[in-house]
Image (cartoon, grey):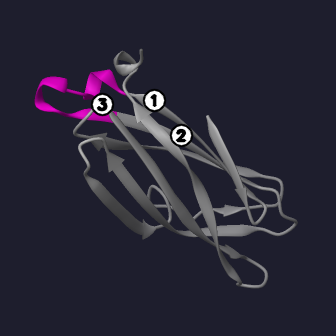
Amino acid sequence: MVSKVTEGIKISVEQFYQPDYSNPLQLEYMFAYRVTIQNNNNFPVQLLQRHWFIYDSTSEKREVEGEGVIGIQPIISPNEQYQYISGCNLKSELGKMVGLYLMENVHTRQRFEVNIPVFHLEAPFKRN
């Protein structure tokens, strides 16, 4: 698991290789990741947007942007957390993801960016 704190928001990410949804012979590798967003501020925040950078060891780079996460723009109260699971497919057994969330202080409507730490997507059979 990797974690990073920005503006009082702690982002932690765990990744999991999905062998049942992967087909290495067709260069299809599926990964799931669990993100935990913990609000360590004394005010509620709302996650408005996400912006991901996805890197494949085949040198392919993709960007994914959109509202909220998994179709939701959650409000996270002070000292509470929000967790979700999503997925990513690659054309190789190695890659990485990094990104940011656009958050808003619910009381003041001030918006700020929160960094999502780099996490590696690695099929277990690739490890030495």
Question: Disc 3 vs disc 1: which is toward the camera?
Answer: 3
Amino acid under label 3? Glu
Amino acid under label 2? Arg
Residue 9 as seen in the image, left or right of residue 117: right
Residue 93's disc is 3
Picture quadrant of residue 112: bottom right
Which tag, 3 or 1, sits closer to the chain's start?
Answer: 1
Residue 34's disc is 2
Q: CA distance from mark 1 to mark 2?
A: 8 Å
Amino acid under label 1? Phe
Q: Secondary structure at mark 3?
A: loop
Residue 2 position, x and y percent, is 62, 40
Q: Are marks 1 and 2 in contact (CB under 8 Å)?
A: yes
Residue 122 position, x and y percent, is 40, 30
- The structure residue drawn at horizontal position 45% and vertical position 29%, both measured from the top left corner, is 16
- The structure residue drawn at horizontal position 72% and vertical position 50%, both measured from the top left corner, is 81
Q: Secondary structure at mark 1?
A: strand
Q: CA distance from mark 2 to mark 3?
A: 19 Å
Q: Are marks 3 and 1 in contact (CB under 8 Å)?
A: no
Category of crowding for the residue at label 3, using alpha-carbon neighbours closer than 10 angstroms: few (below 14), some (14–19), many (at least 20)? many
Residue 127 as seen in the image, left or right of residue 7: left
Q: Report the residue marked by disc 1.
A: 16
Category of crowding for the residue at label 2, using alpha-carbon neighbours closer than 10 angstroms: few (below 14), some (14–19), many (at least 20)? some
Q: Secondary structure at mark 2?
A: strand
